[in-house]
Amino acid sequence: EIFMDSYHQLRQRSGEEMRAKIQVQFQGEEGIDAGGVGKEWYTALAREIFNPNYALFIQAGGKACTYHPNPTSYVNREHLQFFHFIGRVVGKAIHDGQNLEAWFTRGFYKHMLGRKVIPADLEAFD
């Protein structure tokens, strides 16, 4: 499974190692990563981040397009480690210039950026 495999491969890497190019190879597939495999990895991993079985994120206001952290994510014993890992993946995608198919609520983006969240930012929850 891509989420857990990636988590185990990347969780112990230093910041310097995360900034370096990573080689992606899917199990059972041969091929050299000339960029396409890496892009496919980001796409597949982003999809798994929102897998409801991990209980990490829920749809905001029932809308299928934006997500915010699940207030009951604690049901997953490793939720804090997983959130840390996801943050590293988001940072890696930004560093690598990759679009990540992950849409969060405006309030969550502002929280990640350390900006003040105001009531208007919570409209996505209605």
Image: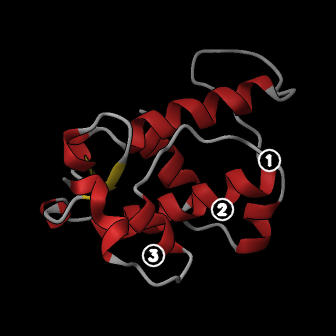
Secondary structure at numbered mark 1: loop
Q: Which of pointers 3 and 1 lies earlier in the amino acid sequence?
A: 1
- Residue at x 13%, y 63% (from the top left corner): 72
Residue matched to label 1: 97
- Separation (CA) of disc 1 from disc 2: 10 Å
Residue matched to label 2: 91
Left or right: residue 87 compared with residue 81: right
- Residue at x 58%, y 68% (from the top left corner): 12
Left or right: residue 45 compared with residue 94: left
Mark 2 is surrounded, within 10 Å at the Cα level, by few (under 14), some (14 to 19) or many (20 or more) other residues, namely some
- Residue at x 54%, y 37% (from the top left corner): 101
Mark 3 is surrounded, within 10 Å at the Cα level, by few (under 14), some (14 to 19) or many (20 or more) other residues, namely few
The circle on residue 117 is none
In-front residue for pair 49/4: 49
**What x and y, as percent, mark residue 63?**
27, 38
- Looking at the rendered structure, the kind of residue marked 3 is His
Residue matched to label 3: 111
Mark 1 is surrounded, within 10 Å at the Cα level, by few (under 14), some (14 to 19) or many (20 or more) other residues, namely few
Q: Residue furthest right?
A: 34
Secondary structure at numbered mark 2: helix
Residue 103 in view: yes
Left or right: residue 81 compared with residue 13: left
Secondary structure at numbered mark 3: helix
Left or right: residue 63 compared with residue 107: left
Classify residue 122 by image quadrant.
Answer: bottom left
- Residue at x 30%, y 38% (from the top left corner): 51
Residue 25 in view: no
Q: Which of pointers 2 and 3 lies earlier in the amino acid sequence?
A: 2
